[in-house]
Image (cartoon, grey):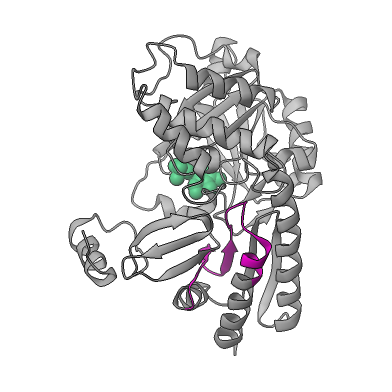
Amino acid sequence: MTASNAERHAQGEQWLVPNYKPQPIALVRGEGSRLWDADGREYLDLMGGIATAALGHCHPKVVSALNEQAGKLWHVSNLFSTEPQLELAKRLIAHSFADRAFFCNSGAEANEVALKLARRHFYDRKEDRFEIVAFEDSFHGRTLFTLSATGQPAYREGFEPVVPGIHHAPFNDLAAADALVGDRTAAILVEPMQGEGGVRPATPEFLEGLRRLADGRGCLLIFDEIQTGMGRTGALFAHQKYGVTPDIMTLAKALGNGIPIGAMLARDEIAQALVPGTHGSTFGGNPLAAACATVVLDELTEGGVLEHAEAMGRKLGERLDAMAKRFGSDKVVEARGMGLLRGLELHGPAADVVSGCREQGVLVISAGANVVRIAPPLVIEEAELDRGLDVLEKVLEDVLA
Ligand SMILES: Cc1ncc(COP(=O)(O)O)c(C=O)c1O
């Protein structure tokens, strides 16, 4: 059990399918915004397991919810009602536009069911609408339908033919979306802020325009809030900051603070299309995952975490803006983002900054090739954030020199 980073890394290279390219450390323990590797080295976490560990690692309330549920009931399938799943659904509905929830295990599955629901909704209404309008540089998952909706051709290479009837417009280009939405369009699928595609917020006019387009042309509007939801932008859901409401929303990542769970939320009239037998998941909304997610939602909405995330997000934004200014536009394209999901776009690859920070004990990630992405636990303390950003700034000095 006490293998070193180097041994674990070598084992991964030998035993695992080589689809990931992990960093050369094995993480063994976490607490709050800190992590420890197999060699006993401590790291400050400014990436939160890719915007997932919203309450930090091993949050005591999530740990006790998981332990308590583990001693009660793990799994019975969705052929039975379970208390944690219904408690979670009740809270998600109370805090959102939605009337109904469907639970699954990941972001891709949440988007998969959202897209299927859009098609099925129009099938029931005997309208020949099956097309999806999505956006360039988007990321929606790795199942074939969600991969087809993802607006980054590199992810599709070798997996074609993709699901037909999906069109991509440039992000934030309302006129281009307008030209693609027609009488065959079932839904427009969009991230209020693109995450993997480079931490790119939608403009208010764009999201408002998509809502108008969907209403005017009679299709549905789906917001993929898998990365932006659950307090990441300082609001519970990013669309609340824009004042634009979707018909369907998908969540995953921070919903369970790291335990696998995804959700699709929809208005009642739309959700009705998924009659018995149309869709399902063995593990979806499993008692263990739902018990954790319930605590996450309670902490965000009643425990002051959203307010803290908003304040820390402002601070993060100010510091990244200052760095962009300091290094100048010939080195840094721009700083952008919302709340505690922000990026610094460089003119060159972000990989050296990511590895340089790691060597200095701070974990950040990239978003696309050139964007350094910062997405710490929402509970990160101000002094920790400052310390991590001091390291980032020093590493940028070296890499951009
Ligand atoms: C916006 C968005 N949608 C969907 C997904 C896919 O989620 P998962 O990896 O849980 O399938 C991701 C993952 O990064 C995401 O950021």
- Whether residue 361 is in magenta: the answer is yes
Q: Is residue 113 left or right of residue 310?
A: left
Q: Quadrant of residue 268?
A: top right
Q: How many marks?
A: 0
Task: Find residue 214 and report its horizontal and vertical position in percent.
Answer: 72, 29
Task: Find residue 97 and report its horizontal and vertical position in percent.
Answer: 71, 25
The residue nearer to you, when weighing 174 against 64, is 64
Taking the image as drawn, is residue 147 in sight? Answer: no
The residue nearer to you, when weighing 34 against 148, is 34
Quarter holding the N terminus? bottom left
Q: Is residue 286 above or below residue 167?
A: above
In percent of the image, x 68 and y 39: which residue is there? Answer: 236
The residue nearer to you, when weighing 19 against 26, is 26
Q: Which residues are magenta?
A: 360-386
Extreme left residue here? 14
- Whether residue 372 is in magenta: the answer is yes
Task: Find residue 386 and report its horizontal and vertical position in percent.
Answer: 66, 70
Task: Find residue 147 and report its horizontal and vertical position in percent.
Answer: 45, 43
Q: Is residue 174 left or right of residue 155?
A: right
Extreme bottom residue here? 401
Q: Is residue 22 above or below residue 60?
A: below
Q: Is residue 278 above or below residue 312?
A: above
Quarter holding the C terminus? bottom right
In percent of the image, x 32 and y 71: which residue is there? Answer: 39
The residue nearer to you, when weighing 157 against 282, is 282
In percent of the image, x 71 and y 50: which residue is there? Answer: 308
Q: Is residue 159 left or right of residue 114?
A: left
In percent of the image, x 77 and y 42: which residue is there? Answer: 241
